Amino acid sequence: PDFEIGYTEEDLKLGRKYKAQTKASELLSDVQSAIDYLKGLSSVKGDGFGCIGFCFGGHVTYLAATLADVKAAASFYGAGIATGTPGGGPATITLTPQITGTIYCFFGTEDPLIPNEQTEEIEAELKKDGIKHRVFRYETGHGFFCDRRDSYNAEAAADAWTHVKELFNTELKMG
């Protein structure tokens, strides 16, 4: 809680240090615990939950999409989905058949952290496994949604946000 860093080299180094200590099983347990807590609140309506994440959070969102309660997932430029998993083990992409809701994935075609071949591999796996999905590609780099970064792309971010709202309104019956 209360951990927030910026985008200086020092901040990024600290973030990578903590990221290296994570394990997929613990991340999934944390997400499920949050869902279970929300289910217990009388103010929470509906029978499904949405998840959104950016960068490492985009990878975590792809993982979270494998939880039965997650009906809508928006994964933004989740690096490493096709090549690894937090804490080691088979790549997260191998869990794709466990996704039961709808997932939208957003990538920049000029992202040095996620080669276009990996984006294509993710999309092919989603199609092969019959997962409800959409994959969006923008001619921009990593971090295009974050207006605190030099890589921010207002046009791509606005378009992506339109699709996120569509996803959540449709799958979570918010509209």
Image (cartoon, rainbow, N blue to C red):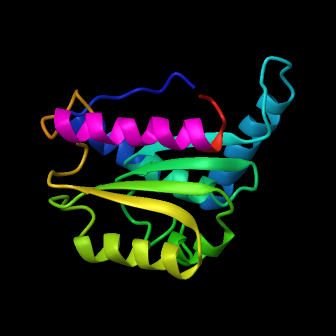
Residue at left offset 57%, top offset 35%: 169
Residue at left offset 25%, top offset 61%: 113
Would you place residue 139 above or below residue 18 in this image? below
84 on left or right of 161:
right
81 on left or right of 111:
right
Q: Nearer the viewer, residue 62 or 138?
A: 138
Q: Quadrant of residue 131?
A: bottom right
Q: Position of residue 146 (x, y in %)?
A: 27, 33
Q: Position of residue 122 (x, y in %)?
A: 42, 72
Direction bottom: furthest residue: 128
Residue at left offset 38%, top offset 78%: 121
Q: Position of residue 139 (x, y in %)?
A: 14, 55
Image quadrant holding the C terminus, namely: top right
Residue at left offset 37%, top offset 36%: 162
- Magenta segment boundaries in residue numbering: 152-170
In reply to whether residue 12 is colored magenta, the answer given is no
Look at the image and tell me whether residue 25 can be seen. yes
Would you place residue 132 above or below residue 171 in this image? below
Image quadrant holding the N terminus, namely: top right
Look at the image and tell me whether residue 83 can be seen. no
Magenta highlight: main SS: helix
Q: Quadrant of residue 47?
A: top right
